[in-house]
């Protein structure tokens, strides 16, 4: 699909959305992703012909980028010419309704294609030298879920749990990620209830080829757990309370302080994908009930965040 088909010409005002979709048009590996999904897509031997896989994939990605529900996405395709053009639809063709959009997402969930989308994108990024494998930084973030019981079942989502951070209590799930220590790109994603401790998932976030791993003070003891991987050296931050106590007793020398600063500078890489997820894509609340559906969405979101973070390098390579 050419950029001219998106209306990305000099006679059209280049809004932020237009710029964003223009960049994503260039960096998303459409052909490879379509080839991944096509074997699982309906063939349309009976009934009306299905929409093209690439069209539905573009619609699905726009939902993630702009935080749109299925009904909102259908309306946007009717109301926003740019969205329709990005999906490859003309004003003479039909638009996928919310049920069709829902069925495509369920297709991805049923065949566990979201983790494969992340793996495929990372494979392409690795081939371009953007994803190294010698070090991993791990972290987790809380994603809120509705705590209200004013719904059809009259209950909160049973797979979402309470978690305390500081003096504040949260209800929802946790997104645990492992990122490349050099580029900050996400290579592993795990979704759990909010009550699961960060250190429990620490070793599951390693891809197995790294020799160094970094984490904040919440990952104390990761190297001593039963699932710890051999040959990996964990660099864990000193607990704030302990460091504060040592500061008072003047037991923190310059070397220790410098070491903690170096650890912190490396760990900062893991915050970049979370910023893209929550600020760029607006994903601050879970959209679905249950961990499985929401974890599948996280895989897609972090795959897209990798492309967003690497977009300038990718576009320079394209010339």
Image (cartoon, rainbow, N blue to C red):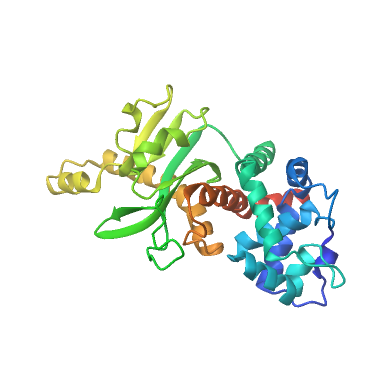
Q: Image quadrant of residue 11?
A: bottom right
Residue 116 as seen in the image, left or right of residue 179: right
Q: Nearer the viewer, residue 170 or 129?
A: 170
Quadrant of image for the N terminus? bottom right
Residue positioned 64% across, 40% down in the render: 116
Q: Nearer the viewer, residue 188 or 63?
A: 63
The mark tally for this picture is: 0
Check the image and name the residue furthest to the right. Answer: 92
The reply, left or right, for residue 225 in relation to residue 288 is left
Residue 24, given in percent of the width and then of the height, sits at: 70, 58
Q: Is residue 98 visible?
A: yes
Q: Is residue 319 visible?
A: no
Taking 126 as reference, is 149 above or below it?
below
Residue found at x 45% / y 52%: 271
* Location of residue 293 with respect to 75 vertically, above or below: above
Residue 152 drawn above or below residue 225:
below
Looking at the image, the residue that sits furthest to the top is: 230
| 319, above or below 59, in the image | above
Q: Is residue 95 left or right of residue 141?
A: right
Which residue lies at the image location 27% right of the left edge and 60% below the top edge? 168
Q: Position of residue 74 (x, y in %)?
A: 69, 69
Give the percent coordinates (x, y) of residue 109: 61, 46
Q: From the top left corner, tell me how far across and down residue 112 is, in percent.
A: 62, 41
Q: Quarter-wise, where is residue 217 in the image?
A: top left
């Amino acid at each position: 699909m050419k950029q001219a088909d998106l209306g990305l010409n000099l006679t059209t005002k280049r809004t932020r959305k237009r710029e964003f979709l223009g960049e994503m048009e260039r960096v998303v590996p459409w052909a490879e992703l379509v080839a991944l999904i096509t074997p699982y897509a309906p063939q349309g031997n009976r009934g009306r012909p299905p929409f093209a896989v690439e069209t539905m994939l573009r619609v699905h990605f726009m939902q993630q980028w702009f935080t749109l529900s299925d009904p909102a996405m259908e309306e946007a395709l009717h109301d926003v010419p740019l969205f329709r053009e990005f999906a490859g639809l003309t004003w003479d063709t039909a638009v996928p309704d919310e049920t069709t959009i829902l069925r495509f997402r369920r297709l991805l969930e049923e065949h566990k294609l979201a983790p494969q989308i992340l793996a495929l994108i990372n494979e392409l990024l690795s081939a371009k030298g953007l994803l190294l494998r010698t070090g991993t930084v791990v972290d987790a973030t809380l994603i809120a879920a509705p705590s209200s019981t004013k719904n059809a079942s009259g209950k909160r989502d049973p797979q979402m749990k309470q978690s305390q951070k500081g003096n504040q209590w949260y209800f929802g799930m946790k997104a645990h990620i492992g990122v490349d220590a050099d580029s900050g790109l996400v290579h592993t994603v795990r979704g759990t209830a909010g009550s699961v401790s960060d250190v429990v998932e620490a070793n599951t976030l390693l891809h197995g080829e790294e020799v160094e791993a970094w984490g904040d003070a919440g990952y104390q003891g990761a190297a001593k757990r039963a699932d710890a991987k051999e040959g990996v050296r964990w660099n864990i931050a000193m607990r704030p309370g302990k460091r504060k106590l040592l500061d008072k007793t003047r037991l923190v020398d310059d070397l220790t302080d410098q070491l903690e600063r170096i650890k912190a500078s490396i760990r900062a890489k893991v915050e970049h994908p979370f910023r893209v997820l929550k600020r760029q894509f607006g994903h601050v609340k879970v959209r679905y009930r249950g961990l499985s559906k929401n974890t599948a969405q996280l895989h897609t979101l972090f795959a897209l965040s990798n492309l967003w973070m690497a977009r300038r390098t990718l576009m320079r390579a394209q010339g």
